[in-house]
Amino acid sequence: MTQSQLQYRKATPADFKGILHLQHQNLITILTGEDLSQGFLSIEFSREQLHKVNNELGIFVAVQGEAIMGYLMAESVEFAVGAPLIAHMLKKLKNVEFDGVPLLFCCLFVYGPVCIDKQYRGQGILEGLFGIMKETLKANYDFGIAFVSLKNPRSLQAHTSKLGMRIVDEFEFGGEKYNTLAFRLK
């Protein structure tokens, strides 16, 4: 597969079946052993939630033909706070800065989750999804924030080295530890 065969765009309802399938294959509750070390998803979304996220800021997809190779979600803080884990992360933002700028007072959104089909990881799909998301949202947002489980070093490495996100905080939720990451859109 070459990058020229891929199309990056905002998802349509017709893409939700493929997104749900890819999500199911990569949930922390499904994966075991070596598969866990390759990255996983911590939060499961329903079809109804996909509709809401896509109607809000959006779900961005990498598509080859009709097959979903990867997806990336973006949610407003107001929308994302409905998830207890994200609400907990957002409460801690009052003390978090990015290059001296207090994130609590910025126009920001929540990045993620992102999921790439394991057969296509390491081929630039993450960067392509990140690029279309940034281009779409940069007119309305200054920063994006995300979280990554400390049990998911592959994801942390991809987001910090490939996308340039920076760790700005660490928090614990439900007995698990997470890093809060931030990045500029402009």
Image: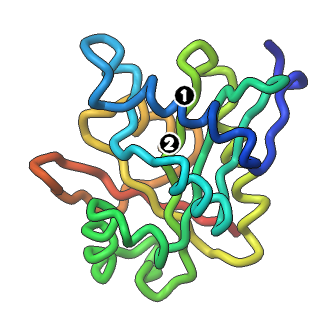
Residue 85 horizontal side relative to residue 132, left or right = left
Give percent across and percent down for residue 53. 58, 60
Query: In which quadrant will I find the C terminus?
Result: bottom right
- The tag on residue 159 is 2
> Which sits earlier in the primary sequence, circle 2 or circle 1?
1
**Which of pointers 2 and 1 indicates the residue nearer the eye?**
1
Q: CA distance from mark 2 to mark 1?
A: 23 Å
Please, what secondary structure does the residue beneath circle 1 have?
helix
* Closer to the camera in the image, 40 or 24: 24
Q: Quadrant of residue 168?
A: bottom left
**Looking at the picture, does residue 86 appear above or below residue 112?**
below
Q: Residue type at mark 1?
A: His
Give percent across and percent down for residue 151. 25, 34
**Looking at the picture, does residue 162 appear above or below residue 121?**
below
Please, what secondary structure does the residue beneath circle 2 have?
helix
- The tag on residue 21 is 1
Residue 57 horizontal side relative to residue 35, left or right = right
Instruction: Name the residue: 34% across, 63% down.
Output: 83
Give percent across and percent down for residue 67. 74, 24
* Closer to the camera in the image, 165 or 12: 12
Q: Mark 2: few, some, or many residues within 10 Å (few <14, many ≥20)?
A: many
Give the number of marks.
Answer: 2
**Looking at the picture, does residue 101 appear above or below residue 119?**
below
Residue 145 horizontal side relative to residue 54, left or right = left
